[in-house]
Structures are given as C-alpha cells and as structure tokens.
Image: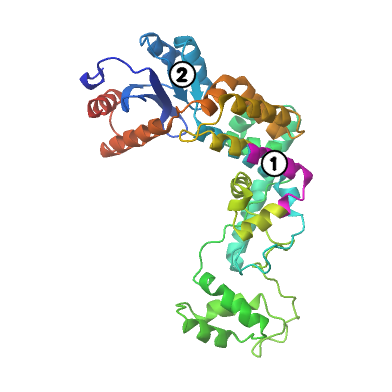
Amino acid sequence: MGEAAQGSIGSADGIADEGKRKGSRYGTIIVDLERHCVVDLLPERTAATLTDWLRQQPGIEVVARDRSTEYASGIASGAPAAVQVADRWHLLANMRQAVERWFAGARGRLQRLSGVPSPHGVLPAQRTGPFPRSASDRQVGSDNRARRLALYEEVRRRHRAGEALLAIARTMKLARGTVRQYAQAADFPERAPRPRYSIIDPHLAYLHARLAEGCEDAAALWREIRAQGFTGTAKQIRRWLSERRTKPARTAPHRWCGRRPTDPALNGGAATPLPSARQLAWLLVQPPTDLAPTDAVVVARVEQDPETAIVAKLARQFTALVRTCNASNQADPQVAQAELKTWLTEAGVSGVPAMETFAAGLEGDSGAISAALTTPWSNGQTEGQVNRLKLIKRQMFGHASFDLLRRRVLLAA
C-alpha cells in the first residue's frame, strides 16, 4: 500500500465498482467517507476479495454501497458488525430501470391507446417524429426492422421452449439485456422515433399558424420565415408542407390523389408515437407537478391503461419516499420505515410482475434500505472518486497496469 494510504481507517467507508473494461472487467474502490479520500483499490468486484480486505481493517462501523449482491455478501462476511447503507441514488436508478423494463414489454399495447385532450388548451406545435426520409433510408429502416423482428421471434420461441435467458444470449450472440427485453415483451418492441433537431423546429409554431390560416404556398412560407432568421432552403419547406396539404399545389403532377394531410406534430393523437421506454420511465418517476404540459399529456395517455396507473402510482410513491429522506432533510426513522414497509406490501401484491420482483429484491436488502432512509451516509463522494480515478486512467491513455494505477491514486490521495 502506498505511503499516502497508511494510517487508521475511518469508521465509515464507501464502496463502488470501477470498470477496467466496461461491461466485462471491474475493480473496487474504497473511500473513507469521514476523511474524504481513497483508502484502497481492489483488482476485482467479488465478495471474497472484499471480505479479505475488510477482515484486515477492524473498526469499520458503516459501509455505504450500491445494490450489488457481491458487495452485500462481502461486507456481511468481512465486517458483520458494520451497518450497510444502500445508496439513495442507486435506489432511484433501480426504480427507474424496473419501470423501463416494464414499459419495454408493454409499449406495443400502450401505443394503441388514444390521445387525451390537454388541460392546458392547445399545446405549442412540436415534432414527435422525424421528418420524411428518402426512399433509400426507408428501405434501410425496413430491412433493419425485419432483422430485429426475426431475432425477437427466435428469442420468444427459445424462451417458450424452456431455454434459460443466458443460454439464449450465448447461442444467439446477443446482449443479455436484449434477450430479457425480447423474452418479456408480449409484442414486438418497436423502436421509438428519435427526431433529431431540425432548423425548422424553431419556426414550427409560425408555420402551423399560417397553415391554419390556409396558406399552402411553400415559397411564400419560406420567404416569411427566412425574414425571421431561417437559414434553410425552400426545398425543406416544400417537403414539410407536402405532408400537410389539403389540396395539390399548382405545380403538382396530375397523379396527386388528394391525400389526407398527416401531421406528426399534433399532440395527443392516437397515431402520435410514444417516447422510448427509457423516456417514459423517466416521466413516470417525476412528480406530476414538475412535468411540462406536453409530457403531462403523454403520461395521461399511458395512464389510461390500468396496469400503467398502478406502476405510475408505485413509482411515484417510492421516489418521493427516497427523495424526502436525504442528507439535508432526514425524515423520522420510524415514519420512514413504516412507509417503506407499507410500500413493499402494496408493491408485492400489485399484480404487476416487474413491481413484485423489484419489491422482493428490496425485501432481501431491507436493512440497507432502511439505513439509507434514516442515516445521512451515501455513496455520493465515492462516485466522485470514481470519476477522478477515470481521469487518472485517461492521463495514462489506459495503458497503466493495476499496480501503477493503484499507486498513483493512493499517492494522490
């Protein structure tokens, strides 16, 4: 151990993993939460390695950690008298991830829900999908969808036959997360539209207002918004207007068939694509009063589904409980524990497998969860030390051995 790490170990430590190679190899960083410095680096993220280290450090009373079962087991074996504290940020992240996984499986059903009117009246025009693409781009997208659909059907077939998810992932050479998503999705999980920023976006409100007045002259619209600062070409406006015309342009060919206008910017329509599962999960864990009007319409639309309403209620209750019990506003320990117990009971009998599984995981870690809600300790500064460790690694272009990296980190502490 480097000289800078010599001396007594504080009574409270923070433990977090740090990726040597993201997704495949991880080490462990140990931080003294009282002295605000790195104590040691371990080459692995295993319970045995952490147990051996803790047994050599008597006097540790509190250990803050993430939700890793390896760390929980290692702390229980190496420092059985220490109080384990689950990190509050990780609790919120785990809740959002559970909701995201549920949405990934239910998104196809929710997409068929009709829109709801906005309580705020007419919402500002906004784009919920990409602008029309070329024929070659559409063909590429269609081919990619067909490939993903074939993988989805094969995963579902293997899962119904009783194969384990890990075995399916190894056989088909897919990520375990992808296999889990496909296995749990009742319908094929379509990719959510991800509209990129367009220079037309700042002028959408004006264009929609002029369109409502009956102006369908692309050249005139282009000249008007060009005077307002638009730097694009008239062709971009013609392409935008072509999807919204109620009658053919004077220069249109005779084969124009009087297509009905389609407007992907309409809010709340049944054809409006829903955001991605990740975006929907983020909206559901936010307090309803903090949502923007457009986001509130999306949430109201998906909450028409009874199961979504249950998930949303449980997610908001849990996140509100964790956010209330922070370091600067500690709740009454007995009240916090009672609220946690009530939430676990409700989630455990909710009838939503994703929530029941999440609640069961919390039940198995109830001691650390209760400590997170009733003590000021967290892994916040430990995550900051992880960020600092990554900076040191990048200064050596990722070529340092573990021993050299450990020595530099400890000497810098």
Is residue 96 in view from this perspective?
yes
Identify residue type, mark 2: Thr
Identify residue type, mark 1: Lys
| Magenta-drawn segment | 301-317
Reading the image, the residue beneath label 2 is 46
Q: Secondary structure at mark 2?
A: loop
Reading the image, the residue beneath label 1 is 313
Characterize the magenta stretch by its predominant secondary structure: helix
Contact check, label 2 and label 1, Cβ < 8 Å: no
Choose top left, top right, bottom left or bottom right for residue 258: bottom right
Q: Where in the figure is residue 297, as x and y percent of width and height?
A: 68, 58
Disc tally is 2
- Quarter placement of the N terminus: top left
Q: Nearer the viewer, residue 35 or 224?
A: 35
Residue at 51% from the left image edge and 15% from the top image edge: 73
Q: Nearer the viewer, residue 57 or 46?
A: 57
Residue at 44% from the left image edge and 20% from the top image edge: 63
Image vertical order of residue 186 relative to residue 226, above or below: above
Image vertical order of residue 173 relative to residue 245, above or below: above
Q: Characterize the local packing of mark 1: few (<14), some (14-19) or many (20 or more) Cα atoms within 10 angstroms.
A: some
